[in-house]
Image (tube, rainbow, N blue to C red):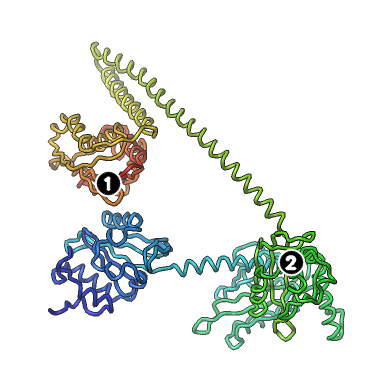
Amino acid sequence: MSIPDFLQGGGEMGERTRAYDWASSPVGAPEQWPKSLQTVVATLLSSRFPMFLWWGADLIQFYNDAYRPSMGNDGKHPQALGQKGKDCWPEIWDIIYPLIFRVLTTGQSTWSEDQLVPIYRDGAIQDVYWTFSYSPIRDDQGVITGVLVICTETTEKVAYLRQLSDSKKELEFAIDSADLGTWDLNPATNKFTANARLKEWFGLQPAEEIDLTKAIDSMHEDDRERVVEAIQYALDPVSGGYYDIDYRIVNPNSGFQRIVHAKGKAIFDDQQNPVRFNGILQDITDQKHAEATERLARQKIEESEKNFRNTILKAPVAISILRGPEYVIEIVNDRMLELWGAASDAVLHKPLFEALPEVRDQGFERLLHQVYHTGASVAIQEYPVQLLRNGKLEQEFVSFLYESEIGTGGQITGVIAVALLVTAQVIARRQIEDVVTERTRELAEANRHLERSNADLRQFAHVASHDLQEPVRKIATYASLLETCTIEGPAENFLQKITTAAARMKALIRDVLVYSEVSDQDALFEPVNLQTTVKELQSEFELLISQKGVRLEYHDLPIVQGIPLQMSQLFGNLLSNALKYTNPDVPPVIVISCEQEGKYFHLRFRDNGIGFEPQFAEHIFRIFQRLHRKSEFSGTGIGLAICKKIVENHYGEIYATSIPGQGATFHVLLPAGLP
């Protein structure tokens, strides 16, 4: 047998699609497929982008080679080809079917980005993230018959973004600890963003983006030309993108002058155009002032080292310098000695793990090795450490930063360790968490009191509605008595308006009373036969059905777990609504049907009445909302709001679809089991 043209190619899935016995499936032989299906399958098989298709009432499946790896090994492939969707994806059917159903019934496409959809593959249920779109596919008659999925797995992307976020936080901590300014220039706009420290140095406003010219204006006038040339050179590909310069800043607000060391790197696109230029700014005022007082190079180096050492020794946080691959303790300040619980003469000029054997095998070897051999910084907060306290090991919590120390030749010579003892803060936070737990319990108790208050409020609404009926009843009674009297002229018209208003007020109070009653969810659930419910309502509406010549069809309605009275109110309001808005130009037909879809019964109340514009599909379920004038159709605007409240009481969903002049369909989803 020849292979149809539309099934040519497609790699492994093309071969499997051609070999599949479609004639024995609900789809039928390929030669008999609708042209639309042939076109979609041909596109799917030839595409190198992951694509998946559900077709027909059974949602028969097709997919291509690009989608195949997402199924993993020892999973659903290859039996997923030609399989019913419900049979293939039982573990996520409750997640994806509502999307499929919405596309099939509304024709509207969906879009989901980085959506968690666990699937069974490689012998286990895995958390998998997807970015995907569900689109309707129509048959040759224009009826929506299939759903096309164009997707890509983003699990690695999500994991990378999480890792990137964590790395960003660590970097921000390291930059903040090192008192650095950061900047990021867009060469195309000549605007840059910066952290708060850099903006403060330049006297800039905390705007999102800043013109480069404003920053240049804050530089010392003798340094501006040199800095501009250095920036232009860094943005030239021949420079390799490197930027390294010292210059002076004069704060335009305070007049304070500081000397900074700027270091950055430009990034170029494939056409060697600069697309990004970022880096750091370090305040080296003290260092430069110290160097300026020394004339000889050796004296400058010694003074710089002395200042650096003094800075460490006097720093408000614990700092030490660990030199060489043995991490010899070269410099350590009193705060670090206090944290270690050691004396300076016992640890200075000794390898770290020899001076402090108790910190072995607590993870520091790996961290120091990473910093010393790669140059990467490591910042960790609230790290649990066993340290000597009064002759015995006790657990402390330390936040620290490890930064590589770079020698004059550019090589890594050691590790700068900055630490902060945060045990007290950790203990305090845990105490706060205990308080929060207690407050949460108190809040739960307050919620219980609120629920009782809501119940009292519903009781008040119930009583108030009953009390309001009495004056309305009297108005109606006296108006009726006046009708027996001889009244002519305008008074007769006024009396008719009083009678009409009293009747509407009575109906409104009745509906408000019903609405307040259905808000009470304390009623017990029990089996409700919906077939019997509709049969009883048919008898109740018998006269109106007969007068309008309505053909009412219903059969095989299920038994649900519900509140009998509310189920009767729900069906009664929907049936009354359909009877009210019949189309006088066509014989009225009302059809009530039901299908079980997964864990839900899908009930449809379909009529061929006047319908409504689709943009009012949600508007009609709001209380006191009407689409027509009272003179056109009677009602209080509460009926559908009552329906929505009843469906919510039963843990379901209600929505409506319509085409003006062709009728409306009300969809009710109710749990198939106990809520």
Q: Is residue 137 visible?
A: no
Query: Which label is found at residue 252?
Result: 2
Q: Is residue 620 left or right of residue 312?
A: left
The amino acid type, in three-letter code, at marker 2 is Pro
Q: Please name whichever residue, 258 or 366, is drawn nearer the observer in this view of the structure.
A: 366
Residue 553: horizontal and vertical position, in percent?
Answer: 15, 41
Residue tagged by mark 1? 601
Q: Please name whichever residue, 110 or 440, is drawn nearer the observer in this view of the structure.
A: 440
Task: Relative to 146, say whether 66 is above or below.
Answer: below
How packed mark 2 is, by other alpha carbons closer than 10 Å (few <14, some 14-19, many 20 or more), is: some
Query: Which label is found at residue 108?
Result: none
Residue 487: horizontal and vertical position, in percent?
Answer: 25, 13
The amino acid type, in three-letter code, at marker 1 is Phe
Task: Relative to 435, say whether 138 is above or below.
Answer: below
Q: Is residue 376 left or right of residue 151?
A: right
Determine the residue positioned at 24% across, 71% down.
41
Whole-angstrom CA distance, mark 1 to mark 2, is 71 Å
Q: Residue furthest top?
A: 485
Number of numbered discs overlaid on the protein picture: 2
Q: Please name whichever residue, 293 or 625, is drawn nearer the observer in this view of the structure.
A: 293
Q: Is residue 344 visible?
A: yes
